[in-house]
Image: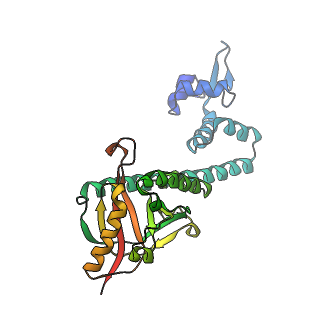
Amino acid sequence: MRRLTIGQMAKLNHISEQVLRRYDRIGLFSPSIRGENGYRYYDIQQSAQLDIIQYLKSLGIPLKEIKRQLSEEDLSTIEAALQEKQRQTEGEIRRLKCQYRALERTLESFARYRAAPPDGTFRLEYIGPRLMYALDTGENFYAHGQAISLFYENSLRVLQDSLLKDGLPLSYFCNAGTLLGQEDFLQGRLYSTVVFVFVDEEFVPNTLTAPVPAGNYLCLYCDDSRREAEYILRLRDYAKSAGYEVCGDFLCESIADIPVRRAGSRGLYLRLQVPVRFR
């Protein structure tokens, strides 16, 4: 039982012969017994070393690094490598969690789009608390009339650059919206220089975010961004006629950014919204 062929060693340790040959080839783990016939055999006691190799490999440590650690026979070296791998794993877990949340948001966006009412529909909706990452571009989108989509795209490039500069994942660069101040909305002044995306508290420092409070929002749905300016005034007039008191900034939120809806441009489906309370 002490002298094992490569096949026996592989079977005993639930590993393939190909892997053992590779370990031998790179000088990581080789047979320790040479028989009279010239063949090389493994010693069953080598299984202890193989266990260590396989364990470190299962933790994601590269074979080259494992070889270096074992050759130095220094426990502190192995410990340092494990600590570094732990930090890397934490970063990867965070990245995957962020990616998973982005998938959730996208699927939620599609669900909202499929359940959204027809264009021009008013609805009073309760919307929970949200966090926005906002950027003032200094460019009033509404000052450009029919060319608003061109300036909106330019503003999105600036927003994208800002996200990257702040070290935020580009998975947030989706369904961007715009903000119009409360007083400008009430006065019918179409002046907006702010673009934003909604983000998660878990992944974005609070120094980079602004809270959007929960509450009742009067919403107007729009399936063509070229009518956004017209619909803002319609929303303001409807709020006034229905007796609502506007109590915050107006938001134009893209609930679906679907490029297949309109070739050559963004197929935006918008939820225009403003927080209101009953008088």
Picture layout, residue 60 above or below residue 128 = above
Q: Quadrant of residue 227?
A: bottom left
Picture layout, residue 84 above or below residue 270 = above
Foreground of the two, 104 or 12: 104
User: Which quarter of the rendering shows the N terminus?
Assistant: top right
Q: Residue at x 39, y 56 (%)?
A: 105
User: Which quarter of the rendering shows the C terminus?
Assistant: bottom left
Q: x, y (%) of residue 12? A: 52, 31
Q: Quadrant of residue 275?
A: bottom left
Q: Is residue 91 left or right of residue 259?
A: right
Q: Quadrant of residue 233?
A: bottom left
Q: Residue at x 53, y 34 (%)?
A: 13
Q: x, y (%) of residue 34? A: 68, 20
Q: Is residue 19 left or right of residue 183?
A: right
Q: x, y (%) of residue 79? A: 69, 51
Picture layout, residue 197 above or below residue 19 = below
Q: Residue at x 46, y 57 (%)?
A: 144
